[in-house]
Image: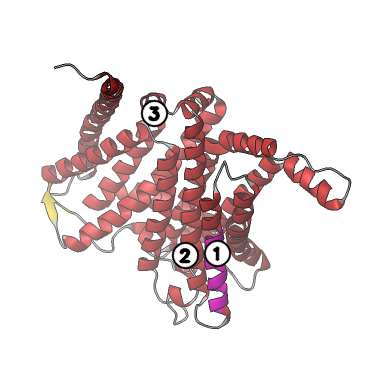
Amino acid sequence: MTIPEHLMIYAASAQQANESLRLRRELQLRKARIAGMWALGAFVIGMIAAALLYNGHAAVPMFSEPGFAEWRTAAPFAAQSIAREIGLSFARVWEMLAMLIQSGGSGQIAAVARLLACVMIFVAVLFTYRRLLAEHYDVHGQVARRDDFRQRAATIGSLLRRVSVALAVLVSSYVGLSLTWMILASMFKDFSALYWAAAFFTGLFVALVAFGAVYWSLTVSTRQLMALGLVTFVVGLSGSFALAGVENNEQWWQAAVSRAGAHPDADWLFIATFGSVFLLFTALWFDVNHFIRLIVAQANSFRPAPDGDSLPARVQRYVRANTYAIIRTLYFAAVIGLMGVGFVQFDSSDITTIIAHTGGAFLAILIFTVGGLAFAGWFPDPIFGVPFKRFSQVCVAVCALSVVLWLIGTLNLAGIELVSLIVIGVWFFVAIDSILAYVNALS
């Protein structure tokens, strides 16, 4: 049976589609093989390490009270040995790190499995980060992003970003694994396993985590990096809220979001969450900064340079010449402001903590809302389009409405912060995704 001539074009397209699908399947299988090899090595190492750490225990509990060491109130040695200038919580960070390492000798499956999994995740991401990303861009036809990635792959900055992402994923994994084991401990109360069974189970857990980390790391895209940052933020804050207790006869939601970070049973998670998000958002910038330069140059080419020597004309020329630098400065100011919320403990008697903590939160919200609206409105329609600009205006309107509700007593400060964080997260994801979609369309 012969195919009619007017249908031959569809037959040729089908052959191209089959070839594209074949290449994608081969890439997935290659990723699975590499991740499987890492998982096998992680299982052997994890089981041996667990057997050494469980030595002397006939039966190993999955989780025993009082639980993870860093979940408890800060130990006094840290506060005495490391000064807390302007309320910085670095003393608590070092204490958490020391307790995390010491948890290997706690004789409980949850602590040992979490520690070994975190170490394996860091090593795996450090050595496999984006090893197959160029091939991923090839099979998906994303030429512009492939070329940009290859140009930056062998630079010093790429190595620094690899380390930053590995650290960020380590902290994100610590947050997720801690909450996972907390849930498992609530589900399987008083569970324990025999010595070799506990070692086997720990090795298996480490292997599964390593498989997932490597499979993700080999071709992690900008969208996935951004999604990891947002998910870590949501999960970490949710866990902090759940662990936070009553302070001054108030729950966290009766005061402010950062109140959860002030409670000694939740500050470890609060700090880790903001630290991870800071690292991920910093690495994310270097993923898209070349594309931002591109769309800034295109936006300038769509608009004629303003004439005259009036103040508005001079301002427009300055903004036109420094748009990229302005966007970069505002972005990092907002990210550093968010980090200040996590790392600086608010103290009403110390003006420096008020500036770093409250000022950081206000600065981040202001930049992402008002600055984000200006960012969306400045670019011509071919780059972002009218729907995205309308969406940005709606986001700003929602934040403004929350402030109005606060002024009339309907919403408290915690409500404003939650609304702003949700709106900023959604807007940020849509903005970055729109940039990537535009760049991919160019190729």
Which residue is denoted by mark 3 in the rendering?
A: 127
Q: Give whichever of 391, 128 is nearer the camera.
A: 391
Q: Secondary structure at mark 2?
A: helix
- Is residue 85 something one can see in this rendering? no
The image's mark for residue 422 is: none
Counting from the top left corner in percent of width and height, residue 172 is at 39, 48
Mark 1 vs 3: CB contact within 8 A: no
Precedes in sequence: disc 1 or disc 3: 3
Which residue is denoted by mark 2 in the rendering?
A: 261
Mark 2 vs 1: CB contact within 8 A: yes
Amino acid type at image mark 1: Gln
Residue at (24% x, 33% y) in the render: 39
The image's mark for residue 345 is: 1
Left or right placement of residue 323 versus residue 147 in this view: right
Q: Give whichever of 58, 120 is nearer the camera.
A: 120
The alpha-carbon separation of the residues under discs 2 and 3 comes to 33 Å
Q: How is the image coloured?
A: secondary structure
